[in-house]
Every structure is written in structure tokens, then in C-alpha cells.
Image: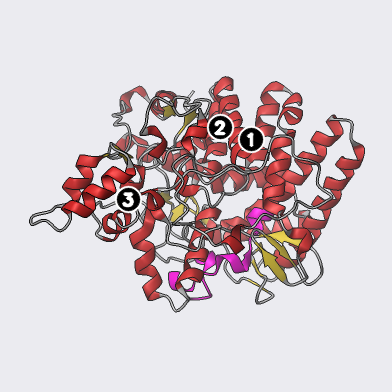
Amino acid sequence: MLNHYFCCLLASLPLMSSAQTAPVAPPATQPPAATAPQAPARPASPRQLFPGLFEAVQLGRVFADGKTFVDAVPRQRPATILAAWKREKAQPGFQLKAFVARYFELPADGGVPFNSDIKAGLRHHLDTLWTVLARPAAPAIDPTDSLAAYSSLLPLPKPYLVPGGRFREVYYWDSYFTMLGLAEAGKGQLLKDITDNFAFLISRYGFIPNGNRSYYLTRSQPPFFASMVTLLAQERGNSELLRYRGALAAEYRYWMRGAEQLKPGTAARRAVRLPTGAVLNRYWDDSDQPREESYAEDVAAAKLSKQPPAQFYRHIRAAAASGWDFSSRWFRAGGGLGTIQTTDMVPVDLNCLLYNLELTLAEAAKLAGQPAQARLYTTKAAQRKAALLALTWDTKAGWFQDYNWRLRQRSTVRTLAGVFPLAFGLASSAQVARVGTTLKTNFLKPGGLVTSLSETKQQWDAPNGWAPLQYLAIEGLARYQQQPLADTIARRWMGLNQRVFAQTGQLLEKYDVLHPNRKAGGGEYPLQDGFGWTNGVLLRLMNRYRVGE
């Protein structure tokens, strides 16, 4: 059973210090956990399983993509492989790449090959991709398989979808936007399966990790679980809010852990207490080591930064937790990656998502006939909204911007994170009018909305556009009756997706919205085909606007 999966823990190489991982009692104001027991021992990551060999492979850049080795499955037990490596590496003619190929089953390049039929049309392509990107359930490690426990892939009890390309596992915030398409395609069972998988992860680990890999177990991603449950409730009824109430509450505790003990002007893990006493949140990763999947890149980047390596790695990992890895929104004004300061920022998007989680918990409490709990969460949501709007709204810029809690000042960087208060209903009508003007004047481009106003060669900056941010902007504007601008964004984005598909037979992870005939770039890896959240958002919009019927 799954307990076998944890037998391979190596305590000798912790990814984080005991001070960073010491358990903190949940606030007394929170309801008891319904689905989140004490977090079990976590499976060892590739760096923990293969000390020395791991660094040699990654720093030696044996593979062009650092994710290749951490996704490989060992053919023998780690102790056997390590002994062979130590014995062979000093021998004349030793080739590390050949050694790894002998002792590990490497992942297929680019995931499952798929050749689309452009003539069959975009809707046919989307319908086919649900099958191409599907992965089967793996509810437990087979106890008769002595090597399965050493894979970095965490088993899930229900089928799921991967984004595509190098992303061979489920991803947290990607999945919500993929699920939008599943709902449109009438795949209600898969919609529920994915939601169940995330509830399972909360139950097992106390939170939803970045993805179902052992090397992702130190961080989460933007908390869209409440939105997933709401989407499922729209399909199956409000009883789903009660069904997942315990998981929702457990996720909330994860984000708020330690908040009650904070003094004004301090932070711990994901919680920040402002000088006013209000509590907001930040992105965080429990490790201060290089990311295993981008180990060589992080080590090289740390050498170019003036920050202490552990601090730099923490900021890098927190940016990965944000999903925006990487963007000028996390850098000091005018600086590059070396100035990254993610954990110093109170992000507008994260706090809008937690506001939505609080309101979802309030609604679930009402349905459960617990008005006191409903009032508790409604009050928390109101307090978060007031604090967030006061800190992030820039009247002069007409935009919502992140807040640096250490410097006690608002960021000057404008990004599409500023549409989250519209999408989740925090903004006033006057603020929405200003945001609409700023979107039209500064962000709207031939292919849709640009992610930021800076070209930095980072993938979450100009000239790139991303499906989830287009969708949230469209939804936010429509929520406040700004339909003409919402329609313009939607049609430009769909047009770009359709044009690229007609030329290449592909739907892509991101797009260049400034130069629609040019491939998007930036980031640590090549442009990926697939692609889960692009597919989900596109189908949702095509159905709404009756395109291609």
C-alpha cells in the first residue's frame, strides 16, 4: 500500500531546516480538520535518493532539460546504483550519460507524440487532446514492485490530465483552467476525478503540491481548489460544497498556519501580519535549496546574484509556487533575476484567491447549518478585502499592484495579476472603470492581453500572453458589465489560437500577443505543445461565442 511508498526516506539530506518545518498549531478559530490528519512522512526526492550522483548529472548538464533526470525511474535500488556509480566513475572512459541510461528509465521526450489533423478542425483537435493528455489512476504503490517507491511520481487514486510536453504530471493551478474545458466537453466524471485527486493530496500531505512529484512537496501553487469545487457544484449541485468542505478547510489552514502567533510587521511561512494587525498571505516554499528540476540553472543564477544563496533560492522557489516563474513583478524595480524578492511581496492574485476560499467556506458552513462558522469566514473575507484594496490599489496608475511588506510600499510593476480583484469581485465599480481603461490603453495587443508592460526575456512578461490570465480578465470585465472590452479580448485571443493551430496543428502553452506571427519565448525551457489550460480556456470561449460550430 502507500505506506510502502515512504519507506525510502533518507533523513541524512533534508531539503529544509527543522526551524522551517517545525509544526505550528492551527489557530483556535479554525474548525477541526475533517480530511487532513497529521502530515505523513514524505517520499524522498531524487536529490535525497541519489546524493552526489544527482549533483553530477544536473551540474554536468547530462540532459538539456534538468527535469529529465528527476522524472527518470531507477531500474535498481538507490543503494545499488550509488555503489555502481562510485565504483565506475573513476574508471577510464566512464560516460555519465551512458551510466544513467543503463540504470534509469528515462521519460519520453515531449511526452506522448501526437500528430494533429488540421483539416479535421480545431474542435476535433480539442476533443482528441482530452485522450492524449489523460493519465490513468495509480491509487497505490504495488508492494510487489520493489522499485516503484523510488519514482518521483506521486500516485493518484483517480484518472487525471497533464498539461503536455515536458509537464508529465498534474499541476495545481493549470488544472482549474483545463477543467473549464472538461465541463464544456461534458466530461463530468473526469471533472470529479480531478477534484477528488486534489482532495486526496490535501488529505495525505496537508496541502496541494505544485504537482504530483516528490520534488514538488515543499510548495503549493495559486489556490484554485475552491474554484474547482464551485465548478463541480455547478455541474452536480451544492452538495459538492459539503462533500469537499473538510478539504477546503484543510487547505485554508495550510495557507494560514502560524498567522495567529505573528506580531505586527512580521511573516512566517505563507502568512504576513501587517503593522495594522491585518493578516494577508505570500507565496512560499519550505526549502532554501536549488530546485531539483532546475538545479543547474538555479546554482548558476545564484552565483550572479548579490543575495545569500539560501535567500535567493527561497525567492526563486516562491516564484515557482506563484506559477509566475519568472516575472518582473518579483524583481526589484529595474532589476533582473538576481534581485528577485518574491517572499517580500504580498501578491494581489494570491489574496484574491484566498478571499474566494473564505467565501466558499462561508457558503459551505451555511449549507451545513452552522451560521457561526459562516459568519467567521465572511468576516475574515471582509477583513482581507479591506486590507488588500488599501494596500494594492494605485489610484494614479488605475491598477492593482503587489505590495512589498518589508519596504512597506506598493510595487510599481503593473501585470495582469491586477485583474484578479475583478474576477473575484473585490473591486468597486469606479476601480473597474479605471482598470478597463488601463487594460485597453496599455495591455491590449493584437493577440490579446500582454502579461506585463516590461520585456525582460522572462516568460511571464511581455510580449507573452497566457490563457488563464486572458480568461480571468474576460470574466472579471463581464462580471462588472464591461462586455465590449471583454468581447474584444476574447476574440483577439481566440483568433491568435486559431491562427497558430491552422499553421502548425498545435495549441501552445503561451503566445506572443504583440507579434502574432512570432513564437513565444523566454523562460527556462522551449515552448511546449499540448496544452491543458490553453485547451480548456479556448473551448470555454469558443462555446460562449459560438465559434467554429
**Nearest the eye: 170 or 122:** 170
Q: Position of residue 126 (x, y in %)?
A: 43, 28
Element type at marker 2?
helix
Does label 1 or label 2 sit earlier along the sequence?
Answer: 2
Real-space CA distance between mark 1 and mark 2, rounded to the nearest whole angstrom: 8 Å
Q: Is residue 292 left or right of residue 29?
A: left
Q: Which residue corresponds to the image point at 56% horizontal and 30% vertical from the top-left?
A: 194
Q: Is residue 378 left or right of residue 18?
A: right
Real-space CA distance between mark 1 and mark 3, rounded to the nearest whole angstrom: 29 Å
Element type at marker 3?
loop
Q: Is residue 385 left or right of residue 509?
A: right
| Segment colored magenta | 328-351
Give the residue number, with chain letter if any, for mark 2: 179
Query: Does the residue at mark 1 contact the one at mark 3 (Cβ under 8 Å)?
Result: no
* Amino acid residing under circle 3: Pro
* Amino acid residing under circle 1: Met
Magenta-colored stretch includes residue 203: no
Query: Does the residue at mark 1 contact the one at mark 2 (Cβ under 8 Å)?
Result: yes
* Amino acid residing under circle 2: Met
- Above or below, comparing residue 332 to residue 500 in the picture: below
- Above or below, comparing residue 403 to residue 306 in the picture: above
Give the residue number, with chain letter if any, for mark 1: 228
The tag on residue 526 is: 3
Q: Position of residue 63 (x, y in %)?
A: 25, 51
- Above or below, comparing residue 329 to residue 367 in the picture: below
